[in-house]
């Protein structure tokens, strides 16, 4: 009966390659972080309501956008690099704002949020201390702040494979508490640039991301501070 119920739950995600295939064909062999394949229904709705670009099906822009959504899905929800299909695990490196690159295993261990939010600033000036966060605590913090999800879109693609250069936008609505700050209900967004080197199978080898994290935290820290006892934990 459990297998039948799982089959009913399978819904094709039109933005994340391999997710529906992994559910249907390999749900028993892939190790999902929370036991089952994820659902992106809520953030997909946010994405469709708030995106500024609707790329033609099969276009380079749509291909890049969906590839990066798929890459993020695997790092957030799979627990073994050997189950990944969007990266070249032997060559993969993630570089953020010019810092030293992280391997696939290192990125998976710390989590995509911590990898993207790590800072070289002195501790007393850090508004987010990635070194003190775990994979779970970082994801819980942003799930709390953005209950409907944190949507992502490609704004432009400047060069095609094998080295893809693109501009992106990340946004969500600050409707839940974040690190002791009450929600404002306002949209939080930031823009950035990425450089993605892929192999002949379009698997990611090098990913470089450049953005200003103060655009994100400046909005998240606007909310008035609230006592720890009043923070809703998820």
Image: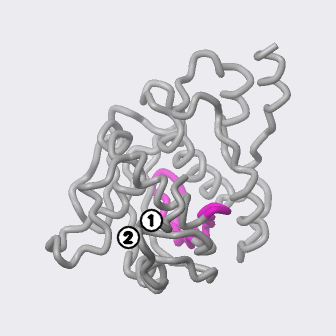
Label disc, if present, on residue 210 of the rendered structure: 2
Front-most of 113 and 133? Answer: 133
Residue 151 in the image, given as x and y percentages of width and height: 63, 64
Drawn side of residue 99 relative to residue 167, left or right:
left
* Colour scheme employed for the rendering of this structure: one colour
Label disc, if present, on residue 197 of the rendered structure: none
Identify whether 122 is placed above or below 110.
below
The secondary element bearing badge 1 is classed as helix
Label disc, if present, on residue 229 of the rendered structure: 1
Q: Report the magenta stretch's main SS.
A: strand
Front-most of 22 and 2? Answer: 2
Identify whether 76 is placed above or below 146.
above
The N terminus lies in which quarter of the figure? top right
Q: Residue at x 56, y 77 (%)?
A: 183
Between disc 2 and disc 1, the foreground one is 1
Identify whether 102 is placed above or below 157.
above
Residue lying at the far front in this picture: please name it.
Answer: 229
Q: Residue at x 57, y 73 (%)?
A: 169
Is residue 154 located in the magenta-colored stretch of the structure?
yes
Q: Write down the quadrant of residue 95 in the picture.
A: bottom left
In the image, the segment drawn in magenta is 147-170
Residue lying at the far top in this picture: please name it.
Answer: 1
Q: Are the two marked residues, 2 and 1, in contact with CB atoms closer than 8 angstroms?
A: no
The secondary element bearing badge 2 is classed as strand
């Amino acid at each position: 009966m459990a297998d039948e119920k799982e089959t009913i739950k399978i819904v094709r995600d039109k933005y994340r390659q391999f997710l529906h295939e992994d559910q249907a064909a390999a749900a028993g062999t892939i190790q999902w972080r929370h036991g089952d394949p994820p659902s992106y229904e809520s953030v997909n709705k946010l994405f469709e309501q708030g995106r500024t670009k609707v790329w033609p099906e099969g276009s380079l822009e749509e291909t890049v956008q969906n590839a990066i959504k798929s890459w993020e899905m695997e790092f957030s929800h799979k627990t073994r690099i050997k189950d990944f299909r969007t990266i070249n695990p032997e060559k993969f490196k993630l570089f953020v704002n010019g810092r030293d690159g992280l391997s696939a295993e290192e990125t998976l261990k710390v989590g995509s949020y911590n990898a993207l939010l790590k800072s070289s600033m002195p501790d007393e000036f850090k508004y987010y201390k990635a070194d003190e966060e775990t994979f779970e605590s970082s994801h819980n913090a942003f799930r709390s702040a953005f209950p409907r999800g944190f949507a992502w879109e490609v704004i432009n693609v400047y060069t095609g494979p094998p080295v893809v250069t693109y501009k992106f936008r990340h946004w969500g609505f600050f409707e839940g508490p974040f690190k002791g700050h009450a929600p404002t209900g306002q949209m939080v967004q930031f823009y950035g640039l990425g450089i993605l080197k892929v192999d002949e199978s379009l698997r990611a080898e090098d990913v470089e991301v450049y953005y200003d994290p103060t655009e994100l935290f400046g909005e998240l820290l606007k909310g008035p501070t609230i006592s720890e006892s009043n923070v809703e934990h998820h």
